[in-house]
Image (spheres, coloured by chain):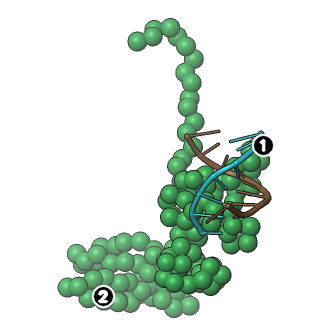
Chain colours: A green, B brown, C cyan
Amino acid sequence: MNSKPHPKKLLKVKKPTLDNMQFRIGELARMTGVSTRQLRYWEKQGYVSTIVRDDGQESRLYSFKAYVKVSVIKQYLDAGEALHDAVVAANVTLKDVKVIQHIMRTAFQGLEMHNDKLMVNLGFFDEQETKRLYVSIESGKVKYQLVDVPDEEPK
DNA sequence: ATTCTGACA
DNA sequence: TGTCAGCA
């Protein structure tokens, strides 16, 4: 449309990741079903934290992690727990999730085809790293399998 | 329009 | 915890 040789402006767009997602208190309230009154109270009690702002703004910002925590607390609340107990239970749950996530990240080494079957590489089975553990699904059942590490691949 | 703090028929 | 006031 415009033929003038204007300098090309390169638009830098921040990648939309969970880590840079931020919510204001009203949004978080709608997302979680927890009232803004509750969110402010929970913060005052130290149950949930807000993002420290570098700019001169006063309104609260919540991270995605805060969203998750609020959601978990809410679930325990709905299950009948008192607020403090719900927070304690939520902390335990989130800590367990961290462990599970670490295990999953560490264990999953990728997918490989072995004799026409799809195998999940779960990494070395032994400390000496002479065997790898694979898991596959055969007719709906989980099947584990040890495979020798070939000599061509020393470590 | 939304958020904030404080107070309570 | 809800809600409303009175600000910013």
Q: Chain of mark 1?
A: A
Give the residue displayed 58% in from the left and 70% down from the top: A69
For residue A135, side relative to residue A99 (left or right): left
For residue A42, side relative to residue A137 (left or right): right
Residue A129 in sight: yes
Q: Which residue is mark 1?
A: A56
Question: How busy is the neighbourhood of tag 1: few (under 14 within 10 Å), some, or many (20 plus)?
Answer: few
For residue A57, side relative to residue A107 (left or right): right
* Foreground of the two, B7 or B6: B7
Name the residue type under label 2: Val
Give the residue displayed 62% in from the left and 66% down from the top: A38
User: Which of the numbered marks, if any, corresponds to residue A142?
Assistant: 2
Question: How busy is the neighbourhood of tag 2: few (under 14 within 10 Å), some, or many (20 plus)?
Answer: few
Mark 1–mark 2 Cα distance, whole angstroms, equals 55 Å
Give the residue displayed 41% in from the left and 78% down from the top: A121
Residue A10 position in % (x across, y down): 56, 29
* Foreground of the two, A106 or A145: A106
